[in-house]
Structures are given as structure tokens and as C-alpha cells.
Amino acid sequence: MSKSPRRGSGTSSVAIHDQKLNRGEGGELHQLADGAIPVLTTAQGVPVSDDQNTLKVGPRGPTLIEDFHFREKIFHFDHERIPERVVHARGYGAHGFFENYKSLSKYTRADLFQRVGERTPAFVRFSTVAGSKGSVDLARDVRGFAVKLYTREGNWDLVGNNIPVFFIQDAIKFPDLVHAVKEEPDCAFPQAQSAHDNFWDFISLTPESMHMIMWVMSDRAIPRSLRFMEGFGVHTFRLVNARQESTFVKFHWKPKLGLQSVAWNEAVKINGADPDFHRRDLWTAIKSGSYPEWELQLQLFDEAFADRFDFDVLDPTKLIPEEMLPPVPVGRLVLDRMPDNFFAETEQVAFMTQNVPPGIDFSNDPLLQGRNFSYLDTQLKRLGGPNFTHIPINAPKCPMHHFQQDGHMAMRNPVGRANYQPNSFGEGPRESPERGFTSFADVEQGPKRRLRPESFADHYSQARQFFISQSEIEQQHIAAALTFELSKVQTPVIRERVVAHLLNIDDRLAAKVGDGLGLKTMPKPAQAAMPTRQDLDASPALSIVNNGPHRFEGRKLGILVTDGTDAGVLKAVQAAVSKAGATFELIAPKIGGVMLGDGKPVAADQMIDGGPSVLYDAVALVPSVDGARKLLGEASARDFVADAFAHCKFIGYVEAALPLLEKWGIAAQDMDEGFIMLSSAKDATGLVESLGQLRVWKREAAVKPAEDAGSTPK
Ligand code: HDE
């Protein structure tokens, strides 16, 4: 080993200061004109002379503790992480605005809802619940949909989910629920998955969770994009107007581009191919100017409606069907800017259900009441002190005047003498009975007890209503998801207990899952506090498939190309996709690209291994005859096509692709309406029109035949 003094692999900053022109590691040129590049300093502002080597005694001697630059650098690095969120640790945020369609002054004095067209700045963080910060995006899970609105009368946080109901009815059960769903404490797996004993054990012993279970076993729990999900405030809240009149309200965010989910087998593969699939999708959309948008819709109702509604509006395991109480559109939320820095904004943002401006108030939903305690508490742990409202992402954008002072990392410090009130010096702010937040003066009375209200006792009727509101294919997906999840449960009695609950929801569903699990005999239906109501009408609004967006806008086509690809067809497909407001990627045998049939080179976005078809909403196979021949033995190309077929995607193809389809087991009779021949450039428009249906779900019967009902366990 050489004993001569060494520099690190980078160029030392001494050398950098000495030179006007320098070559970086990659050989690229850095222009180092005086003043153009700032001098590296310590956090105290001391200029640093060498950032490549610690201070040592002699070239090979021990490191000196007086090396304050090294110590400060490592100290800060050691403390870079803050505790991740106990739940919703994995998330992704974006900035935007909310804009009113109309004034809601009749219902609320909330300042942000008073003036038509007014925009309120917003920050939204989407999340999964169970996994840690580094877990995959396509876990089967509820998605958080937390919205912070920086109103002129204080921040309003609507901390919602993409599912309108919740697992439990009382906040005191939240730690149990979360412990159960997270990785098991001894082995520390499985990560970001509910498919394990502890979760299903808890669920099987908690019948109030059944409605939510139907939702999380449905395709809602594996959304295609954060842009294609609904959001819900879940609880009943109150709007309170200037006359102190209260109207109950449920908040709904409806995605402009419609709802869309992926298939479970697809989700599993996306997690491997691109664990950041949802992040990348949101980042790419916003950076390219395709701003996702949601409409805020309100279900507004009074005490009389609440009294005659079938269920208790304070029970967070129940929803109000939209057909019974149509939501009213009141404004739109647009996300148009990604954070400059993930940590500063998305990681440090502190949502709190108790952040409400005057005009918005709580109901007595016991889950909401518990949350109002939890969120403030959790910020202290995560952000390290009481001054987290000084962090820009959490700071209101309206004036603030109060006497709170000092504490860790205080950034805004009071000036003047009086830091209390009342005071004799005429200093500082005073409260305002007119403008200030006033709680709705509801009259409460009753014995102080730990009690679950009788009106919360029906655990199955809305679970059944959700199930019967789904299309057949969605019902099959629910049965398949339950079968998959319970197949990972190793304790047979837990599996049976869940099936016993399903018997209270729908016999066919229970039979299907029982059969899928290979139960020899069916259990008895679980004991129910109240019998399941059979008279609730289906609610068509609850289906994703029956409410398709009928357009390909915002979606992505994967186009497989090879050397010799017909340039005319390719260009026509690209143009038609762009015209529909969608995007495409070219997938080629090599990332360097291909030479098209017209002799022009074109760059690829992905090589076939790096761009499996699960990353696209649909595919087009546009190889040349020779290119297709070369792909015949290529396993990744086979998967590309086989997965697109199995996941019921639309497949555009040129004649030259037929040998590929045939070789990979797709015979002429398998080619349903989801196969669209691209004989010439003219066919591209037809292809893109069909793509608006998003999936050919009826194909699923061919690729995944339904279980034989005759084998139903007795
Ligand atoms: Fe949360 N929840 N939660 N939650 N929740 C948190 O707050 C809690 C519940 C939701 O992107 C925590 O800052 C309790 C329902 C979202 O930063 C914590 C109960 C709904 C987010 C907490 C619930 C939610 C959280 C963890 C039962 C949908 C992420 C970190 C009473 C309406 C917000 C944090 C973000 C985060 C507590 C139930 C949504 C521990 C006690 C119901 C979207 O305070």
C-alpha cells in the first residue's frame, strides 16, 4: 500500500479553489469562474478548506478530535432522521389550491367558502397506512388523503382517507388495530401487508370492521394512481353559519380523471418493478403540467335527516349512500407544484384533525374526538418540540398574534414588554368574540360511562350493501382478495372465523372464500348483535367499474418497438395518445433505441426488462417482422405480452406481432375485443378510443376461471 498522502476520490476543494476550470468525475466540465460557485462552509459559516479528508497526525496517523468540520458534519448526518409516522409513514405530497364554485355562506361562516372563484393555497399528502417509510406503493391498504388548506382564518386540515368508512368505532381501539396490522412484533414481518395472522385475528374478533373489510378487500385498496382515487373526510362534521346554525356535512373529493385500480397480480409485480410507482406517477404528471384535480362535494344534512337515517351518522363505520343524499359540488382542488424538498415539506408536514377555522366544527363521532387528541400529541414526538408551526409547511399563511413563546427551536420571537394579557401597556393581541372560533353550542347530557351506543350495533348491513353494489368482476376480486389474504393466515380457526362473518354479509361470497380456502365444512354464521338487513338497495355509486371514466386521459401506453418498426404507425399512435391527453413510453430491446423502418433512429424510454407491461395501462406491439422474430425466445418480452393479456389490458398490435402472440400462447380465438389491429396509421385513433374503457374485464373469466360453485363446502 502506498504511504504517500492521498486525496479522496473527489477533487479536493483546495484544488477547486486553485483552478479556474476543472473536470468532474464523469469528465464533465465545471465552469469555476470566481464567485460563480459558493465556498463550502460549516453550519457556523466558517469556510472549509478540505472536505475530502479528516484532520490527522501525519498522513497515516490518528484522526484529531479537534476536527470541528468533520465532527459537525457527522453529527448532523447522524441526526438526519426524525421518527417516521406511527401510521401513514409512507407518503407523497404536492402543493396546489382550492377554488370555490359558489359561496357557502348560507351554511358556514368559514372564510374560505365565502367568495366565488377565490383560491386558497393547499398542500396534500397521500399515504399508505401500514408500511414503513421505505415500503412499496402498491400494498393492499387504505390510502391517506390529507389536505391542508391555508385559509385566511387559520389552517384547516381535512385528514381523510380514500375509503369513506373506518375499521373501528371508538378511538380507544386504534392502537390495537395498528399493532395488529403492522409487522408482527417478534419476527418483524410481513411489512406493509395485512395478509397475516395478527391482522385477521383482530378483525375476526372485531365485527364492527366488516364494512371496512369489504372496502379494503376491493380494488379500492390497490389504486392505479393517487390521481385516480377518491378522498373522504369519513366523519360527520358540522358547518356553522354566522347565525350559529349548524348543518351536518360529510366531505368527499372526486377525481376529475375518474377512479381506476389495478389487478392484484399486477400490484404484486409493480411493487417489484417500481416500488415508487405512485410517487413517480404524481411527480411526472405534475412536472409535465398535467395537474390532477378533484371536486369537493358535500353531503349536507340536518338533525331530521340524521334521525330518520337507517344508521347513526356518528358511527364512522357507516356511510350515507349518495343516491339517498346526493353530494353537492362546491369547488375544486388542483395540485400544480411538487415540493422543492421532500423532507422539509412532505415529511415535516403536520396534519391535525383539530385544525379547523371558524365555521367548521366537529361532531361527537367518538373516533374523531379521539383523533383530535392524538394528532397534536404525535407532532411533539415527531417534530421534537412545540414550535412545529414555525416550520414553513406548517405555518399559517395568515397573520398570527399570540403570547406563546420560547421552547425548542423558536423561530418567531415576541418583541416588546408585555407577553401576557390583560396588560396595562396596551400591547399585544386581544380575543374577539365576533371573529373568534366559537364551538357550536350543542346541548349535551347523560351519565358518565364507557359505553358503545346501541345505534352502532349493526355491523353487517352496510358491508352487504357495499358488496351487492359491486359489479360481478369487482365481487370476484373481493372474494379473491379475501381468499389470498386468509391463505397467508396460518391459524385455521382465524380463517374460519372470518368466513363465519362473511356468512352474515353474503352467502355466495362466504361460499366462494370457503371453497377457495379448501374448508371441508362451513362454519356457522358469526353471532350478530343485529341481523343483517336485506332491504338496503344497492348503491351504484360504490362501484369503480360501473362508473368508468370512458377516456384514456392521464393514462399511459407502453409501445414495444424494434429495429425496423413502421414509423408511420408509430407516429400515428403517439399522436393519437397525446391528443387524448395521455402519455406513452417506448420499450425497446436496448435502451439505446432502435432504427425505425424509415431509417430514422428513435430513443427508447425503457429496455424490455425495465419496462414490464404492468407499468402501463395498455400496450401496443409494433415490432418489425425481423424484430419480432428476434424477440421470440426472449422471456421478458413474453412476460410483457402475457401479463398485459392476463391483466385484461387492451393490446394494439401490428401483423408482424402475430408470431409473438402465438408463440406466447395467445391463439386467434383468445383475441377478444381488447385486441386492436393496427393495419395502418389510420387505426391509431380507434385504438385510443377503445383504450378509454381501460380494461377488458370480461377476459378475466378466460384467464382466471371462476371456482366451480358445485365444490362449495357444506
Ligand atoms: Fe389517523 N393518525 N388516526 N386516521 N391519519 C395519524 O398522525 C389516529 C384515522 C390519517 O399525511 C397520525 O401525524 C387515531 C382515520 C391520515 O401526515 C396519528 C385514529 C382517518 C394520516 C393518527 C386515527 C385517519 C393519519 C400518525 C383513531 C381517516 C396521515 C402521524 C381514532 C379519516 C397524515 C400523524 C399525513 C396520521 C392517529 C384514525 C387518516 C398517530 C388515534 C379514521 C391521512 O396521530
Image: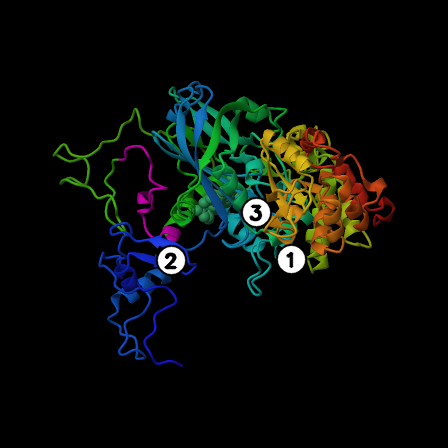
What residue sits right under mark 2 in the picture? Answer: 80
Question: Is label 2 in a helix, a strand or a loop?
Answer: loop
- Residue 500 visible? The answer is no
Give coordinates of residue 248: x percent, y percent: 49, 27
Give coordinates of residue 40: x percent, y percent: 28, 57
Instruction: Give the mark, 3 or 2, whose residue is nearer the N terminus.
Output: 2
Nearer the observer, disc 1 or disc 3? Answer: 3
- Three-letter amino acid code at the position of disc 1: Asp
Question: Is label 1 in a helix, a strand or a loop?
Answer: helix
Nearer the observer, disc 1 or disc 2? Answer: 2
- Three-letter amino acid code at the position of disc 3: Phe
Quarter containing the N terminus: bottom left
Q: Is residue 603 magenta?
A: no
What residue sits right under mark 3 in the picture? Answer: 277
Q: Residues within 10 Å of mark 3 (few under 14, many from 20)?
A: many
Q: Residue at x 30, y 24 (%)?
A: 434
The reply to whether dot 1 and dot 3 touch (C-beta < 8 Å) is no
In-image side of 58 versus 488 (left or right):
left
Q: Name the one closer to the observer, 13 or 237.
A: 13
